[in-house]
């Protein structure tokens, strides 16, 4: 059993393959956290100390205070002055005091109401702990779902209003962990559009440090993932705690070091972009947060999350080969028509592509980015016989077909907006701000979602689509809804995301044979919520291979290669540049972004060779374990390898940065290689013993622009 309750100690113990998580019921009311770390049967007792000025309950113990003991879930106003997990306004004060009531353990898990969540399998178990607030009559249910094989525990909460009055949730943080130390570094991923997921590692300090988004999307600026690790932790050694949020909207990650040197980590819906009113009898389900622990360094933490995301988050079809696509955006922008794209399809087939993806410009009056969003019907000037006829002609050339959509947005210059201006997010009496000539549709309004469902159902009826690229090209401002009363406007951010997930669910069910690639101007929604619907995410609008090396390296800390859509863009006739771009792109799921009609035969022949080679080893990156050898944030090069679970195949990549110094030889140790096996580098035919690979392969850095090295070792 992964979950046990030790009745005599009133202790809950959650075991995964390599970790143990434990907490106790103290005074028959508080949930006191006692341990999270390497798997053990020797668990410490709850530590409850006292400091001057700390509140206490006299009839319990005047020497113990909620302000200084480790908690599973803290409540605003309950005597704990540290950042709290739940603020529930029941009487105007926001003060609650939830106490333990009951618990149960069951196989599998419950579905989250309208939200993405990790899938259960036959080994999944869940602990439900119920707490009650006697004054408000509300119930709080804390859920711990265990994915034991990948060392991951998920957390979410359900609030039930069992009282007679409405209550308002002002803060809801389903993941909270108190760690009995503060000598830790915090790892996070920050950035901007075209420069997503930059690696940052800084020591913790006393007080609060946070990662957040108030943009209505998880954002390019801060990814929801964070990790805490020993100051000396490396890829191979040291303690590491990893956390992530299965949600695509505004979020808050808080890390606080308190007065006694304890670290509190919280993850969820912060107060700035969230409130939610529960009427009597209603309930609220939070999004899910996930956590993992590694005693064997950052690399093991990453691999835990990689395995978890592939197995329990991404659609099962994502484990199958991803199509190598030719996307029309950088080649054509809005200048597309039937004849041009049929010619694209012909050349794509000759060159070995699986699919042609028609990007923006196919619908409404969409000749530029100032008009047409919201008018999701084919442009008959560009496709005179309609979309279905056009797609048949594309597929007759021997390639699959993908199409771009951006359902959440609307141009003011569109038939939709002229008919329903109230369907855009807006605040009464205020002129809505525009971004990229767009407004955001009010996806919290069920009428808007149902309209989009009906429109896409009609437009794509009978159209044989294999692939949707789903984009979102601005963040949310003037966030208000015309259908919600004044006292519920704080719910728009959350209701918006549930509306988006409702539309995703419909697409998945309506087009069961099609797959989805999600996008938000690249990596603006590179999160676990989106990963439940798409086989991959357009990692960045930036296809410059030097920048992509940095982006992809950092993304791999939290997310598997199978999530990364990585395109080779136009090498401008330079064969060396084409080779370099390819070696960068095979770090994820390969695609191309160029005008195939303007490429030389030499370039097209080389692309055909690349695609053919990629299909011999793409399974290693898609399904295998990732080992980072040299981070480009520290060195003048990036080095990493993927390996199959049994290390029968190993794919090693070394990417030199623009400032890499020439004449340096690096010894790269492939520790996953089988010691007593022999390997052949398929690309060169050179033989290696497993012992030699483990001791290290020497790679000479050339220090020349567009230099990269690729090795494909296969066990003999």
Image: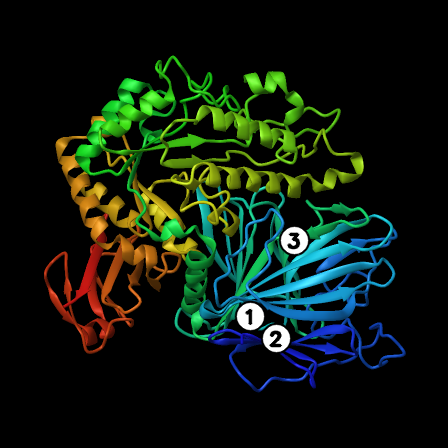
Q: Horizontal placement of 416 versus 141: left or right?
A: left
Q: Horizontal placement of 147 versus 443: left or right?
A: left
Q: Horizontal placement of 611 versus 11: left or right?
A: left
Which residue sits at x=38%, y=60%?
Answer: 634
Q: Is residue 672 above or below residue 537?
A: below
As measured in the structure, the alpha-carbon distance from the residue carrying label 3 to the one carrying label 2 is: 28 Å
Q: Secondary structure at mark 1?
A: strand
Q: Which residue is mark 1?
A: 184
Q: Which residue is mark 3?
A: 286
Q: Secondary structure at mark 2?
A: loop
Q: Please identify, in this view, whether the residue under mark 1 or under mark 3 is nearer the observer.
A: 3
Q: Residues within 10 Å of mark 3 (few under 14, many from 20)?
A: many
Q: Residues within 10 Å of mark 2 (few under 14, many from 20)?
A: few
As measured in the structure, the alpha-carbon distance from the residue carrying label 1 to the one carrying label 3 is: 28 Å
Which residue sits at x=53%, y=46%?
Answer: 221
Q: Which residue is mark 2?
A: 181
Any part of residue 36 in sight: yes
Report the disc number at residue 5: none
Q: Indicate the quadrant containing the N terminus: top left, top right, bottom left or bottom right.
A: bottom right
């Amino acid at each position: 059993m992964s979950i046990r309750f030790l009745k005599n100690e009133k202790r809950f113990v959650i075991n995964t393959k390599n970790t143990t998580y434990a907490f106790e019921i103290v005074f028959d009311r508080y949930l006191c956290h006692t341990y999270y770390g390497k798997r053990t049967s020797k668990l410490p007792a709850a530590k409850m100390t006292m400091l001057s000025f700390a509140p206490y309950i006299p009839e319990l113990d005047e020497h113990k205070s909620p302000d200084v003991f480790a908690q599973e879930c803290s409540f605003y106003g309950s005597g704990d002055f540290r950042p709290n997990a739940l603020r529930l306004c029941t009487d105007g004060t926001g003060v609650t005091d939830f106490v333990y009531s009951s618990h149960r353990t069951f196989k599998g898990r419950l579905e989250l109401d309208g939200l993405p969540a990790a899938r259960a399998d036959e080994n999944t178990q869940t602990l439900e702990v119920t707490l009650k607030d006697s004054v408000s009559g509300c119930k709080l249910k804390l859920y711990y779902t265990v994915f034991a094989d990948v060392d991951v525990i998920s957390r979410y909460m359900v609030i039930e209003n069992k009282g007679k009055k409405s209550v308002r949730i002002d803060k809801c943080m389903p993941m909270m962990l108190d760690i009995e130390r503060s000598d830790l570094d915090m790892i996070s991923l920050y950035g901007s559009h075209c420069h997503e997921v930059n690696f940052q590692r800084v020591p913790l300090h006393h007080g609060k440090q946070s990662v957040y988004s108030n943009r209505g999307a998880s954002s390019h600026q801060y990814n929801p993932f964070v990790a805490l690790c020993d100051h000396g932790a490396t890829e191979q050694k040291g303690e590491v705690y990893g956390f992530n949020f299965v949600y695509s909207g505004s979020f808050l990650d808080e890390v606080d070091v308190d007065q006694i040197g304890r670290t509190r980590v919280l993850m969820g819906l912060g107060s700035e972009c969230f409130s939610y009113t529960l009427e009597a009898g209603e309930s609220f389900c939070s999004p899910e947060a996930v956590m993992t622990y590694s005693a064997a360094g950052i690399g093991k933490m990453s691999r835990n999350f990689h395995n978890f995301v592939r197995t329990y988050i991404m659609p099962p079809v994502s484990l199958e080969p991803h199509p190598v696509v030719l996307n029309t955006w950088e080649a054509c922008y809005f200048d597309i028509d039937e004849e041009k794209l049929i010619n694209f399809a012909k050349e794509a087939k000759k060159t070995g592509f699986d699919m042609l993806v028609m990007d923006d410009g196919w619908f409404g009056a969409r000749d530029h980015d100032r008009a047409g969003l919201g008018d999701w019907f084919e442009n008959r000037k560009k496709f005179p016989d309609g979309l279905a006829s056009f797609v048949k002609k594309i597929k007759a050339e021997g390639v699959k077909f993908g199409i771009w959509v951006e359902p959440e947005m609307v141009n003011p210059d569109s038939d939709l907006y002229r008919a329903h201006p109230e369907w855009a997010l807006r605040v009464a009496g205020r002129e809505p701000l525009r971004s990229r000539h767009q407004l955001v549709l009010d996806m919290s309004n069920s009428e808007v979602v149902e309209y989009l469902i009906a429109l896409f159902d009609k437009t794509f009826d009978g159209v044989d689509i294999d692939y949707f690229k789903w984009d979102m090209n601005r963040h949310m401002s003037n966030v208000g809804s015309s259908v919600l009363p004044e006292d519920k406007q704080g719910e728009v951010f959350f209701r918006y995301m549930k509306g988006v997930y409702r539309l995703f669910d419909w697409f998945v069910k309506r087009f069961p044979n099609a797959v989805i690639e999600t996008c938000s101007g690249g990596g603006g929604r590179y999160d676990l919520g989106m990963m439940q619907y798409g086989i991959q995410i357009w990692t960045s609008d930036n296809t410059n291979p030097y920048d992509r090396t940095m982006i992809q390296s950092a993304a791999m800390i939290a997310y598997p290669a199978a999530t990364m859509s990585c395109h080779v863009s136009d090498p401008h006739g330079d064969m060396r540049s084409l080779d370099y771009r390819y070696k960068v792109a095979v770090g994820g799921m390969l695609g191309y972004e160029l005008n195939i009609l303007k490429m030389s035969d030499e370039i097209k022949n080389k692309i055909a060779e690349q695609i053919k080679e990629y299909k011999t080893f793409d399974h290693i990156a898609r399904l295998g374990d990732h080992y980072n050898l040299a981070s480009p944030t520290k060195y003048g090069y990036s080095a990493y390898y993927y390996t199959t679970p049994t290390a029968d195949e190993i794919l090693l990549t070394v990417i030199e940065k623009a400032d890499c110094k020439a004449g340096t030889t690096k010894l790269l140790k492939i520790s996953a290689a089988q010691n007593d096996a022999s390997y052949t580098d398929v690309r060169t035919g050179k033989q290696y013993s497993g012992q030699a690979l483990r001791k290290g392969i020497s790679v000479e850095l050339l220090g020349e622009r567009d230099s990269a090295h690729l090795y494909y070792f296969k066990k003999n």
